[in-house]
Image (cartoon, rainbow, N blue to C red):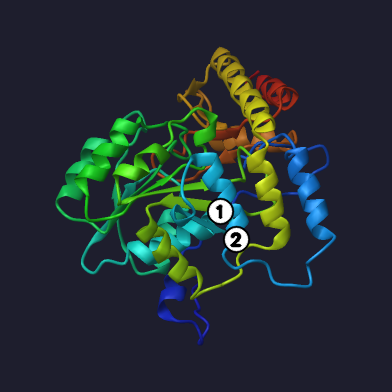
């Protein structure tokens, strides 16, 4: 918040602390490992679909229901069209979900204190009281504490699985415990990174009317620049999201985004190849970082969370940046000693290790 508030601002906007995204600098020869983008290009089928879509129909509005894309998501996850909602990136989908489900008077929304920091911003934006539940000593989500607090009453529960920025995943049994603890509230599971080794909660949707699962095509489908996300849940939850969308922006996805997303979702072979490359590179990088003396949390995401007991994380990040390697350092309690390192190509990760060797030496 600025010291001097412009006179036309509403009080809630004046009090907001907006989300700060990872920087996107223009540095020649940069090895960019700070925003969890996929190091591999999108599926050729996605690029071909975008090129075809660019040749026709751009003078007309896109389908407001994005029916073809919803059908592609249904094919991918064995769901029915009424169980899928699509939006302009998973962040927009999350924003609509917070508005639709978590404004419950007198009740607090539960989420971990170390997680995706946009959750707190959305709570502030919509006037939702957040109840931040501390992660455990190993930075894992404390399911026991969340379930116990939820049983006393809450506005809902939000967990990222695998969690960000730690990369630690929860088993489905833990998700089911949370669903049982708050049967009258929505449990939102943000699975932005699930394709890199996590366990998806989508198979639980049929049994749990309070489960909403959110995915993005930015990570495992290499489409961060296209902005496509979707939510999956039983039909009443999707209907609520549609009501919010159609009261906010009835045409959230353009024709190019929808075409590219369908192409990417339908190219299973390319998806499997690139995600396996990322996971294999991740496991190799873990060993290399441990050889350099780093502590590395177990990750089921396309990034690692690592710290060096003898070196300040901020200084390490600055040293890497001076050598044209970008990683993410969060200056916040409990995790300011850690670096989040996105998984690049094998060559990019090799260069990261070389630069760290120089700094540590």
Q: Give the Cα distance between marks 1 and 2.
A: 6 Å
**Left or right: residue 173 compared with residue 276:** left
- Residue 241: % across, % down: 44, 63
Q: Residues within 10 Å of mark 2 (few under 14, many from 20)?
A: some
Write down the quadrant of residue 266 in the picture.
Answer: top right
Q: Quadrant of residue 302?
A: top right
**Quadrant, the C terminus:** top right
Marks 1 & 2, CB-CB < 8 Å contact: yes
| Disc ID at residue 70 | 1
Mark 1: secondary structure: helix
Identify which residue, 342 or 274, lies in the foreground: 274
Task: Tell me residue 29's x, y (percent).
Answer: 82, 37
Q: Is residue 351 visible?
A: yes
Disc 2: which residue: 66
**Where residue 81 sits in the image (x, y, percent)?**
49, 54
Instruction: Judge whether 341 appears above or below 88 on screen.
Output: above
Instruction: Note whether residue 136 is visible.
Output: no
Which image quadrant is residue 16 in?
A: bottom left
Q: Residue at x 20, y 45 (%)?
A: 181
Q: How many marks?
A: 2
Who is closer to the viewer here, 122 or 338?
Answer: 122
- The residue lying at 46 percent from left, 39 percent from top is 336
Badge 2 element: loop
């Amino acid at each position: 918040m600025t010291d001097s508030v412009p006179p036309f601002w509403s009080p809630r906007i004046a009090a907001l602390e907006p989300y700060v995204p990872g920087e996107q600098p223009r540095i020649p020869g940069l090895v960019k490992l700070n925003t969890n983008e996929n190091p591999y290009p999108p599926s050729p089928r996605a690029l071909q679909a975008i090129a075809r879509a660019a040749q026709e129909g751009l003078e007309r509005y896109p389908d407001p229901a994005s029916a073809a894309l919803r059908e592609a998501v249904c094919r991918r996850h064995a769901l029915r069209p009424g169980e899928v909602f699509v939006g302009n990136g998973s962040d927009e989908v999350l924003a609509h979900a917070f508005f639709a489900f978590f404004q419950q008077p007198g009740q607090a929304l539960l989420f971990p204190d170390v997680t995706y920091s946009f959750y707190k911003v959305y709570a502030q934006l919509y006037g939702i009281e957040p109840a931040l539940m501390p992660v455990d000593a190993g930075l894992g989500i404390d399911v026991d504490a969340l379930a116990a607090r939820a049983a006393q009453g809450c506005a809902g529960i939000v967990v990222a699985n695998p969690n960000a920025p730690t990369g630690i995943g929860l088993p489905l049994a833990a998700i089911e415990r949370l669903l049982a603890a708050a049967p009258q509230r929505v449990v939102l599971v943000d699975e932005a990174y699930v394709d890199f080794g996590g366990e998806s909660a989508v198979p639980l949707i049929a049994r749990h009317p309070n489960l909403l699962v959110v995915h993005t095509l930015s990570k495992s489908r290499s489409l961060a620049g296209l902005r496509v996300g979707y939510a999956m849940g039983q039909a009443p939850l999707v209907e609520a999201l549609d009501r919010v969308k159609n009261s906010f922006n009835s045409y959230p996805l353009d024709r190019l985004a929808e075409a590219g997303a369908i192409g990417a979702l339908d190219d299973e072979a390319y998806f499997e190849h690139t995600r396996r490359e990322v996971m294999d590179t991740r496991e190799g990088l873990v060993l290399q970082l441990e050889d350099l003396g780093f502590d590395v949390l177990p990750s089921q995401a396309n990034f690692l969370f690592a710290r060096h007991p003898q070196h300040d994380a901020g200084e390490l990040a600055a040293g890497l940046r001076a050598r044209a390697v970008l990683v993410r350092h969060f200056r916040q309690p409990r995790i300011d000693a850690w670096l989040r390192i996105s998984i690049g190509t094998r060559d990019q990760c090799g260069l990261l290790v070389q630069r760290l060797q120089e700094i540590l030496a």
